[in-house]
Image (cartoon, coloured by chain):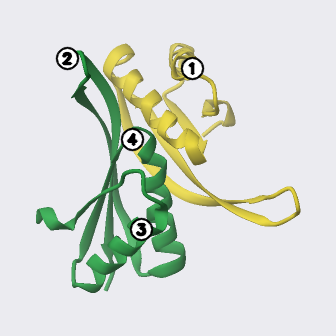
Chain colours: A yellow, B green
């Protein structure tokens, strides 16, 4: 899958990400992957649900993966953060 | 699946839920389902990851489902909230 199909979910409001996903699908992408870490995980789920229920009923959740990423803290310590990847697919 | 295998993730700290999951598996459950809504969704993912990586390496994520639930607000208005269900399974 090409890297440009990935949308990283951060601290903006959900509709910013919804718009980004809709744009990707309208540009012809078949799949868009939402990636989020930590507290943004619930926003990634919100984004997927708003897309599916309100904007693009043809989009399905194809896969959901969870994991742990190790980040480096300010003092060089390791911090474990949960992550999620939600794969959205446009059904034809 | 019996209802007692479900653990609802709320506002407590992650380790409370980890302990609840470990207890269920030690009582002989093959599957435990974590359910969470809204901001607790990221805590449900944290719980699953801590279980898998630190306490019970034999536990696998069997399925992850996301959805939307409609709650009633204080003035009777409808509020949509995202939800997640993470199915954990003890591999033998």
Q: Are marks 4 and 2 on the same chain?
A: no
Q: Badge 3, how many Cα within 10 Å: few under 14, some, many 20+?
A: few
Q: Badge 1, how many Cα within 10 Å: few under 14, some, many 20+?
A: some
Figure check: B90 above or below A88: below
Residue occupied by mark 1: A24
Q: Residue furthest front?
A: B74
User: For the residues carrying marks 4 and 2, which lies nearer the camera in this image?
Assistant: 2
The Cα–Cα distance between marks 2 and 1, rounded to whole angstroms, is: 37 Å
Residue occupied by mark 3: B16
Residue occupied by mark 2: B76
Position of the N terminus of chain A, as image quadrant, is top right
User: For the residues carrying marks 3 and 1, which lies nearer the camera in this image?
Assistant: 3
SS class, disc 2: loop
Q: Where is residue A55? Give x, y as percent.
A: 38, 14
Q: Could you say which quadrant of the image residue B44 lies in?
A: bottom left
Q: Could you say which quadrant of the image residue B80 lies in?
A: top left
């Amino acid at each position: 899958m090409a890297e440009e199909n990935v949308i990283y979910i951060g601290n903006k409001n959900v509709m910013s990400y919804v718009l980004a996903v809709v744009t990707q699908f309208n540009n012809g992408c078949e799949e868009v992957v939402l990636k989020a870490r930590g507290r943004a995980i619930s926003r990634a789920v919100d984004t997927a649900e708003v897309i599916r229920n309100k904007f693009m009923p043809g989009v399905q959740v194809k896969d959901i993966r969870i994991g742990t990423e190790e980040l480096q803290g300010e003092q060089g310590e390791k911090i474990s953060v949960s992550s999620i990847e939600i794969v959205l697919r446009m059904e034809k």
